[in-house]
Amino acid sequence: MRMGIEQVDLTDTEKIRECFEVHHAAQRVDEPEGPWFTERPFAGWLTFGWSSDPREVWLAADRGSAAGWYRLGLPSRENLDQAGLDLVVHPAERRRGLGLALLRHAAGRAAAHGRVVFNGGARRGSPGETFARSVGAKPGLVEVQRVLDIGRLEQGKLARLRGPAELAAAGYSLESWAGPIPEDFLEQVAML
């Protein structure tokens, strides 16, 4: 296999789009019932993450075509021996050694940052779980994802649920803001 692995400049929207296309193809196979990341939130997550921790993204390509990538998250406040790893291989490129090549590359990058433990995720029963087990990964925290397709609910059910929901929500309101927490809400947010 002759794949080049290059670091992604996180301001390069075309490279981020290539990562998204690989991710999207994998999601359709690995998570057929969805819901799937769309391009805009994916780009935000890949570029900025959910925290301010540093990250690296590396893309594997063969003759200019994206085949896989990984995102290495580097916690900066605690768990300094660990790295978060998201590794994705396009379904058409699987079972050819690319996942292992990306994993080895990621291990080298993690070691360069003083990290000795990877944390990552794989859906139960997916090719990702099989791959993770084949390289010695062990399950840790199990998450559950539930999806309610409201389009499949019987027509009258939502209407019947509205009344009791409105009674339970009486006295509550939804507040939102951008930036720091408004002074009026500080105490309530601290209690939460």
Image (cartoon, grey):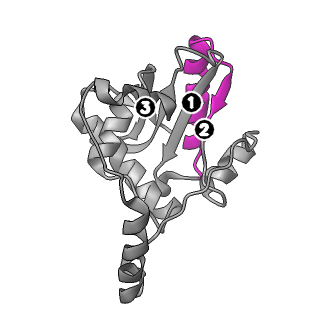
Q: Is residue 136 magenta?
A: no
Count residues near mark 1 (Cα–Cα under 10 Å), then give few for <14, some for 14-19, many for 20+: some
Q: Where residue 39 sits: x, y (%)?
A: 29, 48
Q: Earlier in the sequence, mark 1 or mark 3?
A: 1
Q: CA distance from mark 3 to mark 2?
A: 30 Å
Disc 3 + disc 2, Cβ < 8 Å: no
Say what amino acid the circle numbered 1 marks: Gly
In the displayed structure, would residue 5 be above or below residue 157? above
**Which residue is the site of mark 3?**
189
**Which residue is the site of mark 1?**
84
Foreground mark, 1 or 3, reads: 3
Say what amino acid the circle numbered 2 marks: Gly
Count residues near mark 3 (Cα–Cα under 10 Å), then give few for <14, some for 14-19, many for 20+: few
Q: Is residue 99 magenta?
A: yes
How many discs appear? 3
In the displayed structure, would residue 143 be above or below residue 147? above
Q: Earlier in the sequence, mark 3 or mark 2?
A: 2
Q: Earlier in the sequence, mark 1 or mark 2?
A: 1
Residue 180 appears in the rendering: no
Residue 172 appears in the rendering: yes
Q: Where residue 161 sits: x, y (%)?
A: 42, 77
Count residues near mark 2 (Cα–Cα under 10 Å), then give few for <14, some for 14-19, many for 20+: some
Q: CA distance from mark 1 to mark 2?
A: 6 Å
Q: Identify the residue at horizontal 48%, vertical 65% (top origin).
A: 147
Q: Give the number of the disc on residue 120.
A: 2
Q: CA distance from mark 1 to mark 3?
A: 29 Å
Disc 1 + disc 2, Cβ < 8 Å: yes
Disc 1 + disc 3, Cβ < 8 Å: no
Q: Identify the residue at horizontal 26%, vertical 45% (top origin).
A: 40
Q: Nearer the viewer, residue 136 or 82?
A: 82
